[in-house]
Amino acid sequence: MTNDSSRGPEPRSRRRGPPRDALLASLGDTHVFLLDRRVAGSERRLDSLGLSSELAAAVSEHYRAAFTGEAKTFDFREGDRTCEVHLVPLPPPAREIPQELVAVVHDVTPRRRAEDLLARRVEQQRAIADLGQLALRSRDVEELLGHAVRAVAATLDADLCDIFELQPDAEELRLVAASGWPEGAVGSVTVANEPGAQVGHTLELRRPIFVEHLATDPRFVKRQPLLELGVVSCLSIVIEGREQPFGALAARARSRRRFSADDATFLAAVAAVLSSAVERHREERVTEHAALHDALTALPNRALGLDRLCHALARRQREGIDVAILVFDLDRFKLINDSLGHGAGDELLVALAPRLLAEVRPTDTVARLGGDEFLVVCEGLHDAREAIGVARRLGDAIARPIAVPSGRHHITASIGIAVASHADDTPESLLRDADAAMYRAKERGRGRYELFDDALRRHVLYRVRTDSELRRALDRSELDVHYQPVVDLRTGAPVATEALVRWRHPERGLVGPTEFIPIAEETGLILRLGRWVLERAVAEAAGWQDQLETPITVTVNVSGRQVADATFPAEAEEIVACAGVPPGTIALEITESVLMDELNSPAMVLGELHDRGFKLILDDFGTGYSSLSYLKRFSLDILKINRSFVSGIASNADDRAIVEATIRMAHALGMTVIAEGIETEEQRRRLAALGCERAQGFLLSKPLPAAAAREYLGRHVTTA
Ligand code: C2E
Ligand code: MG
Ligand code: MG
């Protein structure tokens, strides 16, 4: 096309001459041509008029149609220019067919460009709005990223589009979404995070990176795998993240292309949407993770552990995959917490978590139920033996010395195993079984595992039955208390009686405490039972003290559960006050194992009982493994040597040595000594010779019903 307007229109008169084409007028970007149909192809020299041959060809194409109809308008594009062409046939003289037409060629390049730009922007904005909506709706980041790359590829008309995610170590980037990449590339392709690679460069500069010719661009030394994919040009931008960038988003072309600033603006908007969506998703995941994981060890917490167990049991129902669980807690963990502080306990738990995980399969769950209690859910084990194998491995892993800043610790765990074996096993029933097995492991000495088997099932059933019967017994006053005198070895006079509970069972007759006290302790009924015995014994003491006019002491056995309860001292004081008995005439017996219970250390409660005037007796000394120096910290008044040593005192030199040493040390600590279970005269003699002050045993008196005990006391106190 030309702007040469000097030629002006041909004079009208010449139009009757031989047919020819002519430029009629040129005005700015608009040119008006007269075209004559009769000009034959070879003579047509539209290009001589300034019309490009391409436009001439386009006009010829529409030529015929223009003569048959009305005006014909079309767009003509050439390079980056656009012309609007109107073809208007000139009305012919009467009876002639139209032969001439006027072509108005109007260069609309700037307008069309503006329109195109606008349309592209509208399209881009729509793409961003769609993506934004999806980002709000979807919690699936993968889906969102996939949608983003497809939308960018379509909107920018790019051959490839991809997102690389920066890995936590910041060393590598992994392809996480792609359009136009080979199948299987997502998730498997990684590139090094270096400035000499196109993706790394984007992260380094944190602004849009335009690459027109990748192969020759001097900024890059690493061009794979992009060159392999035929990438020639690209535009990329960083997707920001909170601590470090999330990654990079890129549009790529396989033919040379110059991406525009507008393209970069669009890409930046997409990256911004993705950045905030990913960030929000990460935050959600963090909150979700915090809600379902233990903050200290990062292991699943109770809620998640139970949820995993639920799912495992559901899969068992559906697919027949076996499920076993292990429940365990750490032996003497409380001791570490109490002696070295909670920080040390925490360190231990944190150090233990990876050890536990290392011993189970990745599909198994290790959850912290709370405190030092853990749950392991194992799927796909074939029998109990395999579950036992897991328990062994866990037990060994826990038992390996643990070095943490607070020191080197040796710790063990008591592990209970339960294997789902019934169709109606529920998370609750399985946990209950595993718990029962764990308690059995503790009872049997800790640092070991126990499987919940038929024997344990029977024990549990027995316990449940005994517990309910015992409750009824309490309600129906089927319990009774017998009293065994405690005698002064020098004078032979009774100085106290020990209250020992009995059960007058309607079918089984008189049942001894060893058959039901352990169960009452397991179920917690001991609290009610213990209170009842104390009330009963204190009332009895009040009567005897009145009648005998001597402050005879009554000793009452109390269990660990009772002295673990901080309200016990006040309760005991109230009971003695109501009965009008001086607390100094009531002695409470606790066993060594109670003192060593690191979970519920009774030191405070014992101190308080002592302060309120109660005497404290350490029962069954020698059956635990504590040393006297350890026991010194408790305010104990009397030490009772266990029957097992007393029975050997006449025949066994070791027993004799132990008893002798115990008596000496007890005296050194200011404690009075009672020997229990004296059955022979010889035992009595030897104990008296060793300086033991008091004794108790069948030789002196069996435990007696209250009336008989009163009579015994009446006889011996007065005769003494
Ligand atoms: P313990 O407190 O060590 O009581 C001594 C036990 O030894 C009593 O058994 C008693 O009958 C028995 N005994 C006493 N002298 C002799 C003897 O010369 N030879 C033999 N072979 N045994 C003798 P019992 O009454 O069966 O009580 C057993 C355990 O039950 C008690 O041991 C105590 O730990 C517990 N117990 C009894 N009553 C209560 C109670 O009211 N509360 C709690 N928490 N425990 C109780
Ligand atoms: Mg006792
Ligand atoms: Mg005893």
Image: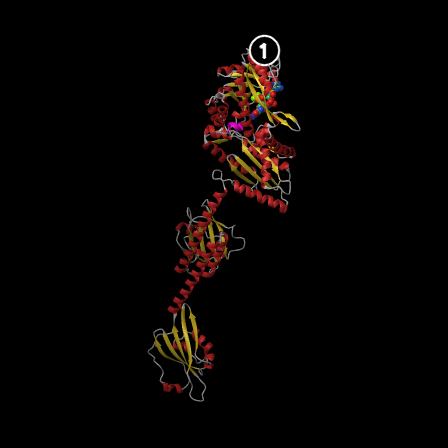
Q: Residue at x 66, y 27 (%)?
A: 508
Please identify the quadrant where the C terminus is shown.
Answer: top right
Given residues 642 and 452, the one toward you in this image is 642
Packing grade of label 1 (10 A; few <14, some 14-19, many >=20) is few
Q: Position of residue 585 (x, y in %)?
A: 50, 19
Quick check: is 562 in the magenta stretch? yes
Q: Which residue is denoted by mark 1 in the rendering?
A: 685
> Is residue 554 within the magenta segment?
no
The location of residue 681, given as percent across then percent down, is 61, 12
The disc labelled 1 sits on which kind of residue?
Arg
482 is higher (above) or lower (below) than 208: above
Q: Determine whether the residue tagged by mark 1 lies in a helix, strand or loop.
A: helix
- 281 or 197, which is in the foreground? 281
State which region is magenta: 560-564
Residue 679 on image: x %, y %: 62, 15
The picture quadrant where one finds residue 474 is top right
302 vs 662: above or below: below
The image position of residue 137, as x and y in percent, is 48, 54
Whether residue 165 appears in this view of the structure is: yes
Quarter holding the N terminus?
bottom left
Is 669 situated above or below 318?
Answer: above
Q: Is residue 546 above or below residue 602?
A: above
Q: Main secondary structure of the magenta part?
A: helix
- Check the image and name the residue furthest to the front: 547
View extreme (bottom): residue: 95
